[in-house]
Image (cartoon, rainbow, N blue to C red):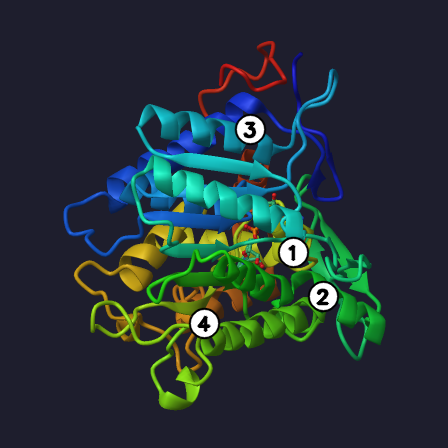
Amino acid sequence: MIIKPMVRNNICLNSHPAGCAASVRRQIEYAKKTLAHEDNANAPKLVLVIGCSNGYGLASRIAAAFGYGSATVGVSREKAATENHTATPGFYNNLVFDKEAAKAGLVSKSLDGNAFSDEMKTETAQAIREAAAAAKLPAKIDLIVYSLASPVRTDPKTGVMYKSVIKPIGAPYSGRTLDMMSGTFITASAEAATEEEIFNTVKVMGGEDWELWMEALANEGLLSPDTRAVAYTYLGPELSWPIYRHGTIGKAKEDLERACREINKKFFSAGTSAEAEGRRFPSGNGGMPPNGRAWISVNKALVTRSSAVIPIIPFYVSVLFKIMKEQGLHEGCIEQIARLYQDKLFRPGCTDKAAVPTDTDGRIRIDDWEMREDIQWAVYETMEKTTPETVLANTDILGFRHDFLEAHGFDVAGIDYSADVDLSGEGI
Ligand SMILES: NC(=O)c1ccc[n+]([C@@H]2O[C@H](COP(=O)([O-])OP(=O)(O)OC[C@H]3O[C@@H](n4cnc5c(N)ncnc54)[C@H](O)[C@@H]3O)[C@@H](O)[C@H]2O)c1
């Protein structure tokens, strides 16, 4: 079958296996080149990535496996191909990841199912034990990456399904954004969320499920005093706050930060006696202070399957990319995560959790280049002055569109899109 992208309302409905494979392989090469060096003694050896198949989660897994040689277990929810429809991009990404890992002699296990369910947590625990045995490692996870982005979640205790919404709180929102495929301006509007919609969005994208994961992994004996955990958030510039930070998603992300504090209190010695109260582990690590901790990492705005549907993102990110590329500061998911590992979480020669650089709220900031004052000023001024006639000159809408298509395996250099494709992904 010949596959062309099918895009509706900034959502791409299909994917290309060969393009997905090439994109994963490009990230693998970057991870090898950037992270694999001698002084990696404190790098993680056994890694769990929840939401491993796309975007930031995929990059986190690739960086750990191919940068550090970690054994990885990944969880994501994908759809295989049918007779006349492609699989989801994550399906192909997992396939090629496992294939490349096997070639490189790395242990990898990819689980496909609902990460919000109790069953998937139990299945994952078993996969971690198997991965540890195969890699001849103790069955203790060194790094847990929580990188889910989902529109729905069923509460495993009550069976109630919740749907998240991207809406402002308190007042309606209306703002200019770009239609990615046509490059024309459109007005994105959203009514203010109801109390129920806010609650539901927090249920889906807040921290409850992360806490349940940590609890399940602790009960399975898979955490150690040195386990590190990280979940991703976005803060963004003030102009996006009405729809993002001060909206329903922002409330959910506040809850993720609450969960981070709870996880630290419950499972890790966080440094002070007050925080250490109630922690699960006695001081450990052969007399050394434990190095485990949970962090929130604030990441840069990037084009992923999830971010493209947030109203202001296509316009803001198109301008941001233009400015950051001009300044030589542009990064994609793999570059961001390589920096997260190398400069923050696993700085060479530095095993002390207290030495992980954070802001005053304890968050890791890899959105630091995006949020630089000069960058933000330039973005703001450019957004203000951009008209329908100057979209191509003032923004990197073409780069945005490319990244969006690439996240689905399209528009990838070197791929013959006129060639017949085996939808199953076998042979990629
Ligand atoms: N994209 C950005 O610009 C950006 C910026 C900062 C922070 N973040 C955060 O990073 C995290 C990941 O976002 P992304 O943009 O990489 O998303 P993405 O859509 O690229 O990936 C989401 C992952 O979650 C998995 N997933 C979704 N529902 C699932 C379920 N029920 N069970 C198992 N797996 C499931 C998907 O399979 C996929 O692997 C989110 O918390 C997001 O808020 C994103």
Q: Which residue is mark 2?
A: 203
Q: Position of residue 270 (x, y in %)?
A: 38, 79
Tell me the amino acid under the disc marked 3: Tyr
Disc 1 versus disc 2: distance between alpha carbons?
39 Å
Residue in the picture at 39% in, 64% down:
369
Disc 2 versus disc 4: distance between alpha carbons?
22 Å
Tell me the amino acid under the disc marked 4: Phe
Residues packed near mark 1 inside 10 Å, few (<14), some (14 to 19) or many (20 plus): few
Q: Considering the numbered disc 4 on the image, is that residue within a helix, a strand or a loop? A: helix
The total number of labels drawn is 4
Residue in the picture at 55% in, 48% down:
51
Residues packed near mark 2 inside 10 Å, few (<14), some (14 to 19) or many (20 plus): many
Q: Which residue is mark 1?
A: 387
Residue 230 position by quadrant: bottom left
Q: Position of residue 320 (x, y in %)?
A: 50, 57
Label 1 with label 4: CB-CB less than 8 Å = no
Q: Which residue is mark 3?
A: 92
Q: Position of residue 29 (x, y in %)?
A: 32, 34
Q: Which residue is mark 4?
A: 267
Disc 1 versus disc 4: distance between alpha carbons?
52 Å
Mark 1 vs mark 4: which is more N-terminal? 4
Q: Considering the numbered disc 3 on the image, is that residue within a helix, a strand or a loop? A: helix
Mark 1 vs mark 2: which is more N-terminal? 2
Is residue 263 something one can see in this rendering? yes
Q: Considering the numbered disc 2 on the image, is that residue within a helix, a strand or a loop? A: helix
Query: Observer-nearest residue: 192 or 260?
Result: 260
Residue 333's place in the image compared with 2, above or below, is below
Residue 379's place in the image compared with 152, above or below, is below
Q: Position of residue 249 (x, y in %)?
A: 67, 66
Disc 3 versus disc 2: distance between alpha carbons?
29 Å
Residue in the picture at 52% in, 52% down:
302
Residues packed near mark 4 inside 10 Å, few (<14), some (14 to 19) or many (20 plus): many
